[in-house]
Amino acid sequence: MDVATFGSTCSPSSAQYVKNLNAEQYSEQYPEAAVAIVKRHYVDDYFDSVDTVEEAIRRANEVKFVHSCGGFRIRNWVSNSGEFLEKLGERSGESAVHFSLDKSTDYERVLGVVWDTIQDVFCFAKASKTEHSKVLRGEERPTKRIVLSIVMAQFDPVGFLTPVTILGKMLIQDLWRTGCQWDDEVDEASFNKWKRWTNILADVHAFRLPRSYFGHARLEEISDVQLHIFADASETAYGCVAYFRAIVRGEVMCALVMSKAKVAPLKQLSIPMQRWCYHGSDPISAAISSSSDSALEKS
């Protein structure tokens, strides 16, 4: 096979196999680039972080070269460093997802999460379902179908907004419990909960979370890194949060890693039993285990 076929069931697997095989063939000549290609790619997106612009340029050029040897062209670079983009000789192309929420700030989508490359923070855009604008403002009563559409549109894979999104999921569960049909308007009690939730959601665009766990601190300035995980449950939901605690330049710093939450089962359980169920399912440790080593290295 000389070219990758598109549309076949095996296409994604074949592309990943060739990408990794090509990197392994250059692992002796470009060991860092080979590791970056195998370990720091998500499908066709490459994510990496280094301490200096010079190191970033060297790594990027090596990755580009190794990819080109396999017939892959990597482009549409995005960075929080304008110097890196200028020295690399490439900037994010028109085909990259790029938009501005105001005149002074550039935003990029990174696996669905909005990244402000100027302030180097993650953020969230305002809800943009214009066809439901009156519903979002609380001027019209939504149906269960609309509630589900808006709640599930809040894409938050890492769990930055878990305290907000879990409230929407709890409302959906309440609608199922009351027997509300898909195109039925919600009852008065649910509508009041909906208005409170949309008022909270309206302020989500002001949320900012630093991309880097410990700011601009270099690796040698960070010590005693600890991973803390807490879980708890109530009668309506249960959740878990993980964060790093470290000594950075002589001071204690904490940084959110990720969080997860679920609504409590319809079949009521005692709170101790819910805690046990959550610890048994352990959805957050599995996600962290595959990335914690690299996160500790790059933090």
Image (spheres, rainbow, N blue to C red):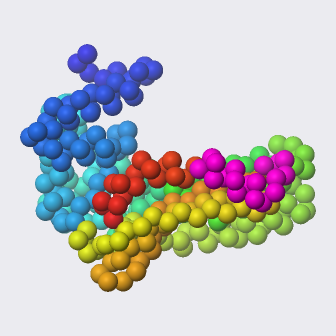
Q: Is residue 196 left or right of residue 117?
A: right
User: Number of numbered discs present?
Assistant: 0
Front residue of 239 and 163: 239
Decide: is 252 above or below 149: below
Quadrant showing the C terminus:
bottom left
Front-lying residue, 199 or 165: 165
**Relative to 97, residue 65 above or below:** above
Q: Quadrant of the N terminus?
A: top left
| Quarter of the figure with residue 237 | bottom right
Give the residue displayed 11% in from the left and 39% down from the top.
28
Q: Tell me: residue 177, above or below residue 117.
A: above
Can you give x and y, in whole percent of width and height, for residue 168 in the image? 72, 58
Q: Is residue 273 magenta?
A: yes
Q: Residue at x 54, y 73 (%)?
A: 206
Question: Most extreme residue toward the left, as rendered?
Answer: 29
Which residue is drawn at the image coordinates 62% and 62% (left, top)?
Answer: 231
In this picture, is 248 found above or below 22?
below
Closer to the camera, 20 or 228?
A: 228
Residue 2 shows up from this direction: yes
- Residue 6 left/right relative to 174: left
Q: Position of residue 159 (x, y in %)?
A: 55, 59
Q: Residue furthest top?
A: 1
Quadrant position of residue 204: bottom right
Range of residues picked out in magenta: 265-282
- Dominant SS type (magenta): helix
**Residue 12, position as x, y percentages in the image:** 39, 28
| Residue occupying the point 19% across, 45% down | 33
In the rendered image, residue 249, in percent from the top left (x then y), is placed at 29, 81
Query: Any magenta on residue 127?
Result: no
Can residue 86 be seen here? The reply is no
Residue 94 lies left or right of residue 194; in this view the side is: left
